Image: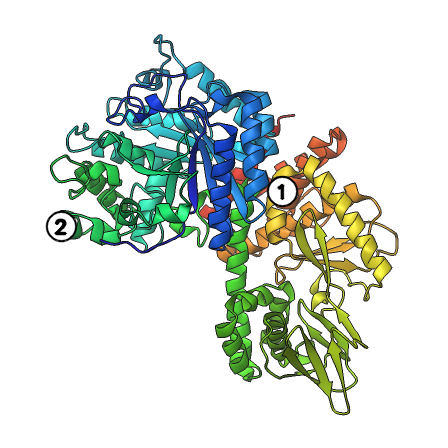
Amino acid sequence: MDGLWRPLRHFVLKVHSRCDLACDHCYIYEHADQSWRGRPVAMAPETVRAAAGRITQHAARHGLARVGVVLHGGEPLLLGVRRLRGVLEELRGTISGVCELDLRMQTNGVRLDAATCELLLEHRVRVGVSLDGGRADNDRHRRYRNGASSHTRVLSALHLLRRPRYRPLYAGLLCTVDPANEPEAVYEALLAERPPRIDLLLPHATWDQPPAPVGAWLRAFHERWAADGRPVPVRLFDSIRSLGLGGPTGTEAVGLDDGDVVVIETDGAWEEPDSMKTTEPGGGATGLTVFDASADDVTGLPAMRRRRSGLAALSATCRACEVVRQCGGGLTAHRWSARNGFDNPSVYCDDLKELIIAINEHPGPVAGDLGALPADAFDGLGYGYGDAATVALLADAELAVNRALVGEVVGETAAGGQLLAELERRAPEVFDEVLRHPFVRSWAVSCLDGGGSDCDPDWAAAIAAAVAVRAGIEVEVPVRAHGGRIHLPTVGFFAAPAAEVTVVPGPGGFTLRWPGGRTQVPGNRSGWHAARWVTVDGTRILLEDADPYRDRLEHAAAEHLDAEAAGGWSAVLERAWGHLAADAPEQLDGLRQGLRVIVPLAPAPDGTLRSATSRHAFGALGLARADDPAAVAVLLVHEFQHTKLGAVLDLIDLVPEDAAGERLRVGWRSDPRPVEAALQGAYAHLAVADIWRRRDNRELFRMYRDWTAEAIDALRSGDRLTPAGSRFVARMADTVNGWGA
């Protein structure tokens, strides 16, 4: 039962150990473990600092690209705005230096106000709110200590989170199941709050204190949700369906995926997930703290390794069950009994089996049918945004497309194929970085779409040389000139004096060699031009002014820039980024994750603004240089909407084939547009309208909003969208409707 060692990726910080409600089903205050009584009320700044340091140390040691931190309690909002700011600044300032930080908070919502939302918006904290249904259902358990209802205050918090300004904060609702509540009434009450996601929590229980059956309740909730067309992701249902399709789970409640969640208490103690507090006094305790033990020490503990042992950790009853790979034995704590420890099936075994069988018999279209995108990521994009994690999923999917296309080209021509395979084996991360270059795909598509003068199949050798140079792999790569240049994607270009130049990487640089001559880089760099990279707010962007396949955009690319012109681009992008932070903050994380290349375009003869993207160049935006950084900010968002939606369309059919020939009237064009083009335009204008709304330019806001709303209405009429397309456009409509007049 010795589970595989894996780094931890999710950390729960108990920043406040008390609560302003007295929920009688609370596993912290009402169950077996009462250790909260001896802990500090709030996490001290030095404990926050030590916790942030341990998380950062762990992420750096294991090269983690991203970690998640959830602020929890008790009730985290009892900290107050001042102390909460200190916690957030410490976490962001420390952890973000080594990896991306996904910050979240779970709250009862009764203290959530506009001032707190502004702070959470500033630090990009997603907020989950606990709500068990309508007033009577919620008040069954979630009351103040004097018995007063908390329901009105929670609804006020949710109303705040639905405002357009704060909607990006809204992560979803957490509902604790109570079979005494009518499931359809609970469903309707939750749906009325327009959550981006619903989590259903089974009341924590053990074999020593068994719960009331919940299987029929879960099945009824699922049936109503399915009958309504699954209007919102439900994590438990989507996870069960995903597991049935061979995919991952999204919750520790089901499945055999490795557990990678750990808790840090207000006194700095490392603990297992909170559900363990329902087992026995000291349940979940490790005996370690952030002051004396690293996260690596925690992962090595027998209790944590047990959580990662898959089938081996389960009872014989579970291992023999036909649905074990979907159920996974349920939550670890729910297997507990004083007699057998964890060597039992879940106390909810019959309930989970009943639900799993119902979902398997009537699967319907759920998150697993959204390709590589989880339902909440898909919906986040539909709302017009998409966080860093979501855009990373799109980027990884586009990388897979690039790999497949390059493989098809080199498979047909054999030029550079064996070398590319060897370089991928020796330097997989560098290989992927080069293949993420947007115009690698443009080249491959040119070759596969008929070739001709547009295609140079030998460019595979240039890709191989770029990988070898960046990885420092000493191998000779002959590269043929293209248009009088040797271009190594993401590295630079060489004004070639011969038809073929051999690239020879070596320690600290590389040599370019041809019949009768050679040059060393760095060193005697005659004829060599390094790729131009600019760093904007910590984001490294390639200013691509040389790639031979960058001209696949709608407008002509500018010629190679001199140093002065390149510096001007860097300055205007830096200023534009400042406008984005003020006017499109929800777009920034996605841009940081997905924007890889800016292609300078030739200016329009009449001086109008000019920008472009290509479906076959994910992450590349074409812009004509403008002196107005506020205008450049609008263009960046506009074009990045196109590149995001193009990636979604690569994964998921939003428009059915039989609608491809239809044309729609749209407000921003005089000519009728194909359905997919109308969707692309509406999606871009949705984000632009939001910018003008924030800038308080009522005239431009109304124009772009009306264009978007009219296009959405046209797209939703008839059979112009697939079920996934209808869901996507419905999310767009939610955003527009949330703006009001």
Disc 2 target residue: 316
Q: Residue at x 70, y 65 (%)?
A: 552
- Give me the disc on residue 42: none
Q: Is residue 405 visible?
A: yes
Please identify the quarter of the rendering in which residue 251 is found. top left
Quarter occupied by the C terminus: top right
Q: Residue furthest front?
A: 292
Tell me the element at label 2. helix
Closer to the camera, 603 or 253?
253
- Give me the disc on residue 587: 1
Are dots 1 and 2 in contact, CB under 8 Å? no
Instruction: Say which amino acid is labelled 2.
Output: Ala
Q: Is residue 450 visible?
A: no
Q: Residue at x 64, y 40 (%)?
A: 686
Tell me the element at label 1. helix
Please identify the quarter of the rendering in which residue 715 is found. top right
- Residue 205: give x, y in percent of width and height: 22, 31
Q: Nearer the viewer, mark 1 or mark 2?
A: 2
For residue 411, above or below residue 622: below
Please tell me how crowded label 2 is: few (under 14), some (14-19), or many (20+) other residues with Cα within 10 Å: few
- Label 1 vs 2, first from the N-terminus: 2
Instruction: Say which amino acid is labelled 1.
Output: Gln
Q: Residue at x 49, y 50 (%)?
A: 59
- Residue 148: give x, y in percent of width and height: 37, 9
Please tell me how crowded label 1 is: few (under 14), some (14-19), or many (20+) other residues with Cα within 10 Å: many
- Residue 230: give x, y in percent of width and height: 39, 39
Q: CA distance from mark 1 to mark 2?
A: 49 Å
Q: Residue at x 74, y 91 (%)?
A: 515
- Residue 349: give x, y in percent of width and height: 18, 40
